[in-house]
Amino acid sequence: MKVLVYSEKHAAAKDIGWHRGGTKISYYQNGIRKDGSKNFRSLYTLTFTYDFEYDDDNVFFAYCYPYTYTELQDELNMIMADPVK
């Protein structure tokens, strides 16, 4: 359950985009209850530690690989163009 990390300087230096990173990863029930249905559901919190490699860098974190609307449209067009699918 490592988070995804994108560092602009890391990507430029090592030609690596999104990658898994972080340490001391914890995912736990946080005691907050969500009221939206018949049953109360508990909410969860994700915590992690990240050591930044570069000074003055832009670093982004994501729970899953980012997927743009354009990528979705391209994939759907490919599926629709395939007569078998």
Image (cartoon, rainbow, N blue to C red):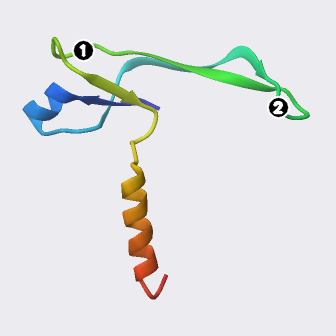
Q: Earlier in the sequence, mark 2 or mark 1?
A: 2
SS of the residue at dot 2? Answer: loop
Taking the view exactly as shown, the residue that stands out farthest to the right is 38
Residue receiving disc 1: 52
SS of the residue at dot 1? Answer: loop
Q: Is residue 45 left or right of residue 71?
A: right
Residue sitting at x 37%, y 57%: 71
Image spot of residue 20 (x, y percent): 33, 33
**Residue 13 picture quarter:** top left
Q: Is residue 1 left or right of residue 16?
A: right
Residue receiving disc 2: 36
Residue sitting at x 47%, y 32%: 1
Disc 2 or disc 1, which is closer to the eye? 2
Q: Is residue 73 above or below residue 63?
A: below
Image spot of residue 29 (x, y percent): 67, 19
Nearer to us in this view, 49 or 57: 57
**Residue 9 picture quarter:** top left
Residue sitting at x 42%, y 62%: 73
**How busy is the neighbourhood of tag 2: few (under 14 within 10 Å), some, or many (20 plus)?**
few
Amino acid type assigned to the residue bearing label 2 in the image: Gly
Nearer to us in this view, 15 or 20: 15
Amino acid type assigned to the residue bearing label 1 in the image: Phe
**CA gap, disc 2 to disc 1?**
38 Å
Q: Is residue 79 above or below residue 57?
A: below
